[in-house]
Amino acid sequence: MPAGSSVRVAGASRDFVFVRHGETDWNRERRVQGSQGASINDAGTEQAKALARSLWEVPLQAVYSSALPRAVETASYVAGPHRGVTVTVDARLNEIHHGEWEGLAEAELPDLDLYHRWREDPTSCALPGAEPLEAVHARAIAAMRDIAVRHSASEGLVAVVSHQIVLALLKCHVLDRPWSQIRRHALAVASYEVLTVGEGFAPRP
C-alpha cells in the first residue's frame, strides 16, 4: 500500500504531490535501475492502483511524469480517476543515469563498497560514468519551475511522478537541506508526499 504524508513549510504558497513509481522487476532484483529499467511489474500495477485510490479525492489539475515507462505507467493510474487530466511527460524528470553500472545486480557490481558509499551519501563519491548530481538537480528544478508557471495554485494540485534521486533532490531544494541528506528524504517505491513550496517552486525558510 502507498504511504502518504505531508511536509509543510511555513509561509509557503502552494502544494505539489510528489509520487514515486511502482515496483519493477529490477527493484525486486536489486539492480541499478537509473535511466533504464523495466516497466512496473504485477505488484507495481497493484501499487499504482492503490496510489490512485489514495489520491482520487485530491483535487488534481495536472499529472506530470518522467519519460521512463515505470513512471508513465504509474502516472496513468494516478491521473485516471480525475476527469480531463492526462499525463504530461517531461524527460527532465527522468532518474539519474548511473553510468557504467546500470542494469547490474548488486552482486555483479565490480566495487560494491563504492556503491554502498554512494547510496549512503551520493555527494561523497561518484559512480563510473554517472550523471553528476548537479546536472540532475538543474534539469529537475527547471522542469518544476516551468510546471509552477504553467499551473495556477488556485486551480488545484499538481502531481509529479518520478524517481528516488530526482524526488529527493527536489525535496532537499524545497526544504533547504544539503544533498548529503538525499537518502533521508527519499520516497519508498509507490509512495507519495504533499510538499508546500514557495512562489515559482522556491524553497521556503
Image: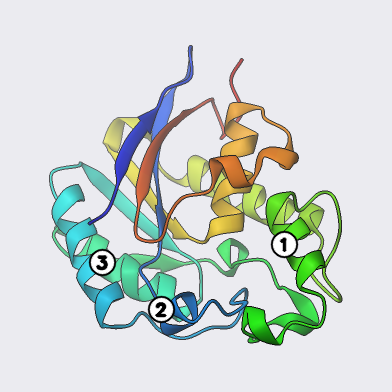
Could you tell me how far apart the alpha carbons at marks 1 and 3 are, in whole angstroms? 29 Å
Tag 2, which secondary structure?
loop
Q: Position of residue 124 (x, y in %)?
A: 85, 50
Q: Which residue is mark 3?
A: 48
Of the two numbered discs 2 and 3 on the same chain, state the one appearing first in sequence: 2
**What's the residue at 77%, 55% (across, down)?**
133
Of the pair 160 and 153, the residue shown nearer to us: 160
Q: How many marks?
A: 3
Q: Which residue is mark 1?
A: 116
Of the two numbered discs 1 and 2 on the same chain, state the one appearing first in sequence: 2
Q: Which one is closest to the eye, mark 2 or mark 3?
A: 2
Q: Which residue is mark 2?
A: 24
Eyeballing the image, is 180 above or below 69? above
Tag 3, which secondary structure?
helix
In the figure, residue 152 lies in which quadrant? top left
In the figure, residue 98 lies in which quadrant? bottom right
Query: Horizontally, is 107 left or right of 29 in the view?
Result: right
Query: Horizontally, is 158 left or right of 125 in the view?
Result: left
Of the pair 121 and 60, the residue shown nearer to us: 121
Of the two numbered discs 1 and 3 on the same chain, state the one appearing first in sequence: 3
